[in-house]
Amino acid sequence: MRAEILAVGSELLTPLRSDTNALYLTAKLLEVGIDTGARMTVADDAGLLESAFRGALGRAEIVISTGGLGPTEDDLTREAAAAALGRSLHRDPALIEELKARFARFGRVMAPVNEKQADVIEGAMVLRNPRGTAPGQRVEAGGRLLVLLPGPPHEMAPMFEEQVLPVLRQRAGGRVVRTRILKIAAMGESDVEQVVAPVYKNFTNPRTTILGGPGQVELHLTAEAASAEEAEARIEELASPIRERLAGRIYSEDGRELPEVVGALLQERRLTLAIAESCTGGLLSARMTERAGSSAYFARSWVPYANRAKVEDLGIDPALIDGHGAVSEEVARAMAKAARERAHADIRAQRHGRRSRAPRAFPERP
């Protein structure tokens, strides 16, 4: 079963706003075994919206839209969805009264323009919205399910979880999907692919996705099963041989990022860390101190950006800088050694530009 998500709103096509609803919906759909085939952002344009609804309904069994259910002229989701389905809209008197009562509770009189929010697609089920003035709608059409949700996340998420997700769970036959992310350090995406492809190509469930990012590669292992336990067992069947092939490279399977993992290892081994970094301007130190309690293992750091600072703050020999260049392995090692000695730390680290090589993350236990 496949879904498509439409985020409605011209403001989402500017640098000022981003669509977070689609990320939430994708995750929730995956939990009940429904893949998302496409996500689209559509402007407040009647023709574009109708075309987007038609296309999505032609491809996916489930189509969910967010936004465009307000009372103003540019809120066109209801009209476009009705046109795509070839159905009419009718104004629901009971909904009008509910909207008026909501305004009255806040000591206000509802403007006539809000009556537009009571327009319901022929044959649709109304999704009540106790957190706002925009009701949602759920429509069955030709074996497809179309769901219209409001745009504000604090209205959309509860409406989806309470009034839509149970229907989708039943529709999906009670299947569950689980994903485990293996985070890998010190290898490129193509290198990881060469190592693990002979393993994961033998599996269709779980399926494997490889994602490259700054300083790491992620393997997403996604399994579908009748229960969470069965899905996790399927994932483990694939993860186990991958671990063997990537021994010493996988640093996280539980969502933790590298600084948190390194910090936990330092704390476990009762080691302290000192850092000297130049070209990164303190980035490594900032990452290592994001974790609460980092003072237990993080001693101190230096950011001697200028050559003069390297000499004055860390005692680096000027001749070393002149002979090898400020951005060199030799100067980086000298900076790390000086930082360790001055901080009386167990481990030193240097971050000195792309051409430098870091020492081993953890030396032999003293």
Image: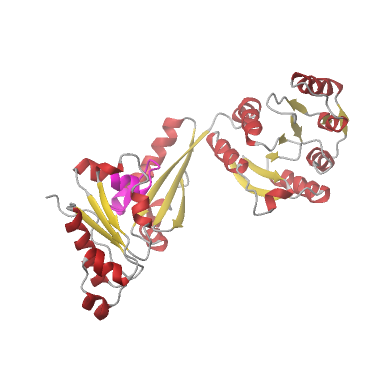
Q: Is residue 206 visible?
A: no
Q: Is residue 246 magenta?
A: yes
Q: Quadrant of the N terminus?
A: top right
Relative to 267, say whether 363 is above or below. Answer: below
- Give the residues drawn in magenta, as a range: 242-264
Residue at the spot x=17%, y=53% of the render?
Answer: 344
Question: Is residue 21 left or right of 50 when viewed as pictured?
Answer: left
- Along the line of sight, which residue is nearer the eye, 30 or 320? 320
The quarter of the displayed image where residue 283 is located: bottom left
Q: How is the model colour-coded?
A: secondary structure
Give the x, y percent position of residue 159. Answer: 65, 28
User: Please, which residue is most extreme toward the left here?
Assistant: 366
Q: Is residue 184 magenta?
A: no
Give the x, y percent position of residue 291. Answer: 35, 43
Residue at the spot x=34%, y=39% of the render?
Answer: 292
User: Please, which residue is most extreme toward the bottom here?
Assistant: 323
- Along the line of sight, which residue is nearer the eye, 105 or 208? 105
